Image: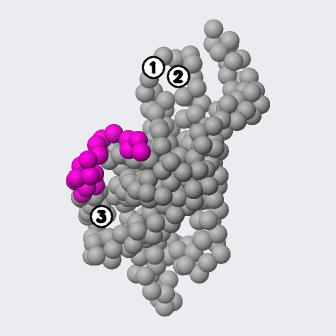
Amino acid sequence: MFIDALVEFLSPGNVVDVLVRGLAEAGLYVMIASGLTLVFGLMGVLNFAHGSITMIGAYLGGLVLVTLAAGGTTVTGLLGFAVAIVVAFGVLAALGAGIETQLVRRIYDRPPLYQILLTFGVALVLDELARIVILFYGLQPSTVWQAVLGTKPTVLRESVDIFGASIGGLELFQILFGVLTVAGVHLFLTQTRYGLFIRAGSEDSEMLSALGVDVRRVFTVVFALGTGIAGAAGVLLAWDPAWGASVPLAAETLLPAFVVVIVGGLGTFRGTVVAALLVGFVDSTMTWWFQNHINFTGLPEMMVFLVLVVMLIVKPQGLYGVSEVGGH
């Protein structure tokens, strides 16, 4: 029986389907986790409000989409999405800069537990504020905002046949967006002056300060960039019926983001990309097996956390992690 199931799994159509779905999952995971790893890599701050920022990005982007793209064509839908990305990135980057300068900066010299408690408190405040605003406008905060799903262009609702596998347009769009995110962050880190400061600061921020660089400003830029990417990821998730814009999205994205960042190695962007691919393929592979031959719902999600457990046992520092980062 297992041999028959394995032969079915290895058929060309199923292999392509699992690979594409794994790449789409990896695209989402790398967007969710990139901001978290940038902030920890330079500043050594574990931002527990990261998931809440993503959730607010989903609602903010959803508001733009419902306003500009509801009932429109594919072109207006994609243009609305581009505007939503810009708005969510800009607003949440500004929010992140405010959180860093007004709250996080005050406790840099205290033990890491203070930063964890502070960002956890910020997450609770943001979640409750979002819940109050959403209820005020007559929406249900615990269920997915269906109006945003309705703004998805027709081309992303349709499927294409690739080697016998039916691949959704949204999955291909998520892969494209994940590639663009990785390329953008990589170019920022390697080709810009601030990227040079970030890489140098993650090694020795005191030496960077001694060379005349305003490290505090670099911290603010990195925190703003991290929250901006999280907000942009929220816009993409708002179109995915498996995620959607809702208040619980904050916790649903924070957990896999931490899994990807820890498996890749705290503070390393290369590790985050590789870990997102690993977790994405494990997720898509186990989802196929559990949906087709093992009748236990919910276990595919558990396998993602099993990857984390195995990594902590075999290699606690992660795939590309170092013993200490963010030593400001």
Q: Give the percent coordinates (x, y) of residue 60.
A: 40, 58
Q: Give the quadrant of the N terminus.
A: top right
Residue contact between numbered discs 1 and 3, judged by CB atoms under 8 Å: no
Q: Which mark is residue 290?
A: 2
- Badge 2 marks a residue whose secondary structure is helix
First along the sequence among labels 2 and 3:
3
Q: Residue at the spot x=28%, y=76% of the render?
A: 102
Residue bearing mark 3: 115
Amino acid type of the residue that numbered disc 2 sits on in the rendered structure: Phe
21 vs 129: above or below:
above
Residue contact between numbered discs 1 and 2, judged by CB atoms under 8 Å: yes
Crowding at label 1, few (<14), some or many (≥20) Cα neighbours within 10 Å?
few
Task: State the extent of the magenta-drawn residues as a range.
Answer: 127-147
The answer to whether 125 appears left or right of 266 in the picture is left
First along the sequence among labels 1 and 3:
3
Amino acid type of the residue that numbered disc 3 sits on in the rendered structure: Gln
- Badge 3 marks a residue whose secondary structure is helix
